[in-house]
Image (cartoon, rainbow, N blue to C red):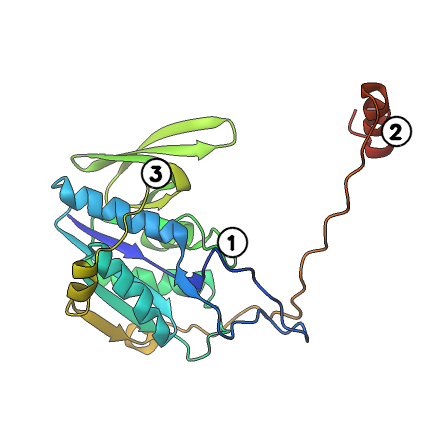
Amino acid sequence: MKVLVPVKRVIDYNVKVRVKADGSGVDLANVKMSMNPFDEIAVEQAIRLKEAGQASEIVVVSVGVKQAQETLRTALAMGADRAILIEATADVQTDIEPLAVAKLLAKVVEAEQPGLVLAGKQAIDNDMNATGQMLAALLGWSQGTFASELTTEGDHALVTREVDGGLQTIKVKMPAIVTVDLRLNEPRYASLPNIMKAKKKPLEEKTPADYGVDVAPRLKVLKTVEPAGRKAGVKVGSVDELIAKLKDEAGVI
């Protein structure tokens, strides 16, 4: 079984994001970029499936700028077999919209014919949480989202999902789309020898035109602002005072 894993280049989760003074977007100058953490979990899960003999090949694909090669090389160093970069824009400020990404991934799926697509549940830059679901709709495939556990049984996959009420386990027929959550696994660090080997692994470069997909944005960002600062807390002298404030000021009881 071939496994396809989409990965995205985002601002590193340890970096404090700064908004440009004119409100035109996020300041990306000299900012560390890395693989989206949820996508890293998806890559790790694909590698574990291969180590367990349940997957034969892992293909990673990224849609975005040319610099996403670094992100793909990271996935190759972790253990993926080959990579595909779809250079959809030259501007690092341009974020390809989920529907366009899903359409491109659908074309890649048609060409690669994987038995399973593992994706992060969302990207930490725009928090859309839409690409995996859109891809499943375009392909007409089964889907399991927010996976915290994943096992395969023949031509079916058992997916334990994290939902508001706790955990839900579903059985989906493969080929399927599974989007992964934080508690699925702990991604490995790429060793130095594997980082060196990754430089020689195949990385194919494509454009949206190769797949006949229009990635022109349908949304326009009018302004970007930082979230409002949190107000200082209030100290209370007794439980009675706390209850009174919760009742009269906060209105929660």
Decide: few, some or many residues near mark 3? Use Cα within 10 Å; few <14, some 14-19, many ≥20.
some
66 left or right of 30? left
Q: Residue furthest front?
A: 237
Amino acid on which disc 1 is placed: Asp
Residue farthest along the bottom direction in this orientation: 90
Q: Which mark is residue 127?
A: 1
Closer-to-camera residue (134/159)? 159
SS at mark 3 in the image: helix
Q: Are marks 2 and 1 in contact (CB under 8 Å)?
A: no
Along the line of sight, which residue is nearer the eye, 53 or 170? 53
Q: Where residue 80 sits: x, y (%)? A: 20, 56
Mark 3 or 1 closer to N-term?
A: 1
Residue 75 image point, x, y percent? 27, 58
Q: Which residue is mark 3?
A: 184
Task: Look at label 3 and name its amino acid.
Answer: Leu
Name the residue that disc number 2 marks: 248
